[in-house]
Image (cartoon, helix red, strand yellow):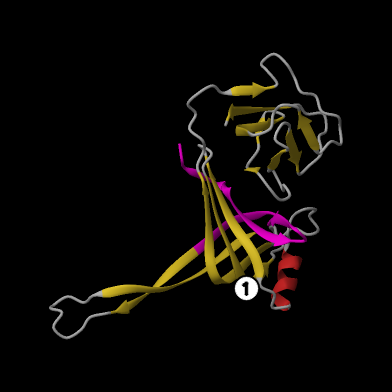
C-alpha cells in the first residue's frame, strides 16, 4: 500500500552539517502555485486560452514548543534564523507504508513565527516560510520484490550489539538492496545512503564487500536484523 501516514511526512532543516527534524512538530504543509498567463487574442473564438508561466511555493509547520532537544531543531533556532534573515535549506520527506520515499528539497525564508501559551495547556508554535528558487524532487520507489529475499542474521540467530554502539559492520553485506532494517522489532523510518542519520533513520554504506550500518542513537540492549536482496 502506497499511502503515507501523517507521522511519516516529516519536515527537516539542514543545520550544522546534518538534517534535523523539527522537535514536536504535529503537522506541516507545502503549497505550490503556478502563475497563469492569458494568451487569448482577437480572433481566437469564444474561449480564452492560457499558458503556465512561473512557479512559487510556501508552507508552514506547527506543533508543541520544545527547547534544547539534541539532534533536533527547535523554535529558538528557527527564530534566530528568521531574525538574521537567513535563507534555510529544508525538505519534506514522505514515506509510504509500502516503502516509497518522496522528498521535496528547497531553500526558503521564514516569514512568520508565532508561539502561543495558555495556563491549562502546552505551548504551541507555528512557522511560515516562503520558498526561493526551485524544488528538487527525489522519488525512490521500493525495489520489486521478485527473487529471493534474505535475512541477516538468518532465522533462529541473533545479532547482539554492544551497548553504546552507533555503527555495525557486517562482512559480506555490501552492495545489497535493503528492503527493511529493524531494531528492537521496529522498522527504521528511512534507509539513507549518505549524510548523517537523524531520528529513526539508518545510514547504509558499503566498501564493495562489507555493509556499514549507522544509527542516530546508540544501542542500549537491543538486537537488530535486516531483509535484503542481491543487486
Label 1, residues with CA under 10 Å away: few <14, some 14-19, many ≥20: some
Count of numbered circles on the image: 1
44 or 170: which is nearer to us?
170
**Which image quadrant for residue 217?**
top right
Badge 1 is on which residue? Answer: 109
Residue 15 in the image: state x and y as whole percent: 74, 62
Location of residue 43 in the rendering, given as x and y in whole percent from the top left corner: 13, 83
Residue ranking furthest to the front: 208
Query: What residue is at 51 percent from the left and 38 percent from the top?
Result: 142
Q: Nearer the viewer, residue 37 or 71?
A: 37
Q: Is residue 26 magenta?
A: yes
Residue 203 on image: x %, y %:
70, 42
156 inside magenta stretch: no
Q: Quadrant of residue 154?
A: top right
Quadrant (top left/top right/bottom left/bottom right) for the C terminus? top right
Residue at image location 54% in from the left, 60% down from the top: 136
Q: Is residue 40 left or right of residue 139?
A: left
Q: Quadrant location of the N terminus?
A: top left
Relative depth, front residue between 164 and 194: 194
Instruction: Where is residue 70? Give x, y as percent.
Output: 80, 53
Q: Residue at x 54, y 21 (%)?
A: 148
Q: What residue lies at 72% left-to-right and 77% top-to-bottom?
A: 83
Callout 1: helix, strand or loop? strand
Camera-side residue: 137 or 68? 137
Q: Quadrant of residue 21?
A: bottom right
Report the magenta residues as a range. Answer: 1-30
| Helix, strand or loop for the magenta stretch, by majority | strand
Q: Vertical placement of 168 versus 22: above or below?
A: above
* Direction from residue 49 to residue 158 in the image, left or right: right
Q: Is residue 107 toward the left or the right of residue 79 in the image?
A: left
Amino acid at each position: 500500500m502506497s499511502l503515507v501516514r501523517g507521522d511519516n511526512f516529516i519536515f527537516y532543516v539542514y543545520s550544522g552539517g546534518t538534517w534535523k527534524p523539527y522537535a514536536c512538530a504535529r503537522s506541516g504543509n507545502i503549497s505550490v502555485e503556478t502563475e497563469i498567463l492569458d494568451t487569448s487574442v482577437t480572433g481566437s473564438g469564444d474561449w480564452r486560452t492560457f499558458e503556465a508561466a512561473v512557479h512559487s511555493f510556501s508552507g508552514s509547520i506547527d506543533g508543541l514548543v520544545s527547547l534544547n532537544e539534541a539532534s533536533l531543531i527547535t523554535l529558538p533556532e528557527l527564530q534566530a534564523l528568521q531574525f538574521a534573515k537567513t535563507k534555510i535549506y529544508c525538505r519534506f520527506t514522505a514515506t509510504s507504508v509500502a516503502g516509497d520515499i518522496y522528498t521535496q528539497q528547497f531553500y526558503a525564508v521564514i516569514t512568520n513565527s508565532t508561539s502561543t501559551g495558555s495556563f491549562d495547556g502546552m505551548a504551541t508554535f507555528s512557522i511560515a516560510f516562503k520558498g526561493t528558487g526551485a524544488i528538487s524532487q527525489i522519488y525512490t520507489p521500493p525495489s520489486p520484490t521478485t527473487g529471493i529475499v534474505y535475512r541477516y542474521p538468518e532465522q533462529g540467530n541473533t545479532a547482539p550489539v554492544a551497548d553504546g554502539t552507533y555503527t555495525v559492520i557486517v562482512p559480506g553485506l555490501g552492495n545489497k538492496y535493503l528492503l527493511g532494517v529493524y531494531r528492537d522489532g521496529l522498522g527504521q523510518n528511512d534507509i539513507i545512503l549518505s549524510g548523517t542519520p537523524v531520528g529513526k533513520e539508518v545510514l547504509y554504506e558499503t566498501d564493495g564487500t562489507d555493509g556499514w550500518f549507522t544509527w542516530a542513537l546508540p544501542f542500549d540492549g537491543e538486537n537488530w536484523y535486516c531483509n535484503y536482496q542481491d543487486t
